[in-house]
Amino acid sequence: MKNKPFSMQVNLDDFIPASPEDKEYLSKMRPSSTFFKDGVKRLLKNKVAATSAFFIIVITISSILIPFFWPYEYEEMLGVTQGGFVDSSYSNLKPFEYGETEQQKIENGEKVFPHIFGTDNHGRDYFIRVVYGTRISLAVGFFASIIVLLLGVTIGSVAGYFGEKIDLIIMRIVDIIYSLPDMLVIILLSVVLKQTLNLEGTFLQAIGGNIISMLIVFGLLYWVSMSRLIRGQILSLREQEYILSAKANGAKASRIIRKHLIPNCISVVIISTCLQIPNAIFTESFLSFMGLGVNAPMPSLGSLASDALNGIYSYPHRLVIPAIVICLIVLSLNLFGDGLRDAFDPKLKH
């Protein structure tokens, strides 16, 4: 056949069945995958982001489970007995120190659970208060991010899809909200809601009106950055052919947004939400430090740091411990958010 290149005769050598070695070679192809699976694989390869995610999960689970079996309560004053006797030796204990009553129990052979972080000036176990403070800070961060997510995605998708006058009106509202000072609005709302809200007898009484006002401010002010981001994504996606095909098939605007546009923005939504959580936690800690956080005796990491200022020279560990916890949580969430951006952003080269 090589000598007759213009021959019309079929070369039978081209139809020889493939050997097992050939089949194995051909089968070594990349398995089918999805954008989400590829992003997860890239995220797990990022050791810093994976470690940060593990650290966040451990802290969250610990803040939820530890209070169930810890022998002390966050509001329990250990030096106060039922008869009204106050043992001042329980106040301001250093880590792994005991009060006089506890020392007597130890001398009598009884087992006493140690105070890992010592106690505060009211004789309350400091470790369980740090755990509860972590729980409050994380809860505020997660709930605030959910509020921002729902409002930002909804308003941004509507503005980006419909455009024209609707987009113009929404963007002008966004510009006005951007000009409002966040902290001033939070302080004003906290003062107003404290007088108008009646939380007595409800599960929100322990949290207080300050946290409720903080969540309301997050819902009113902090959705603007998320909405702008989603709007920009949808402005580019709505011109794609599959959107035109959905319109031609009679799909409603709500269905196109839910089924086509938002799923294609999911990576941006996840990344922005994860980066919003540390911002909310830091804001809550700052406001609690200023005295605008949860109501006493419910602790927060910011309020614990604020209370520790009075004895900073005598008991510096009471300020250092909540400050380190805040730094670790915020740093881990930021690193995890950066890892998500690197893993799920399709514009980056992997």
Image (spheres, rainbow, N blue to C red):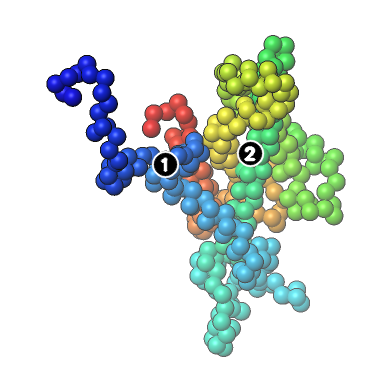
Q: Quadrant of residue 182?
A: top right
Numbered tag placed on residue 125 in the rendering: none
Residue at screen point 46% across, 39% down: 33
Amino acid carrying mark 1 in the image: Pro
Q: Quadrant of the N terminus?
A: top left
Residue 227: percent from left, percent from top: 64, 26
Residue 320: percent from left, percent from top: 49, 53
What distance separates the C-alpha of mark 2 from that of mark 1?
Answer: 36 Å
Residue 89: percent from left, percent from top: 60, 72
Numbered tag placed on residue 145 in the rendering: 2
Secondary element type, mark 2: helix
Q: Earlier in the sequence, mark 2 or mark 1?
A: 1
Residue at screen point 51% across, 43% down: 333
Q: Is residue 202 above or below residue 256?
A: below
Mark 2 is surrounded, within 10 Å at the Cα level, by few (under 14), some (14 to 19) or many (20 or more) other residues, namely many
Foreground pick, 166 / 61:
166
Foreground pick, 169 / 283:
169
Asked if marks 2 and 1 touch (Cβ < 8 Å), the reply is no
Q: Is residue 250 above or below residue 14?
A: above
Asked if residue 275 lies left or right of residue 243, the reply is left
Of the residues tagged 2 and 1, which is closer to the observer?
1
Residue at screen point 69% across, 37% down: 147
Foreground pick, 261 / 19:
19
Secondary element type, mark 1: loop
Mark 1 is surrounded, within 10 Å at the Cα level, by few (under 14), some (14 to 19) or many (20 or more) other residues, namely few
Residue 260: percent from left, percent from top: 63, 28
Residue at screen point 68% across, 17% down: 248
Q: Quadrant of the C terminus?
A: top left
Foreground pick, 78 / 251:
251
Q: Residue furthest top?
A: 164
Q: Quadrant of residue 150?
A: top right
Residue holding disc 1? 31
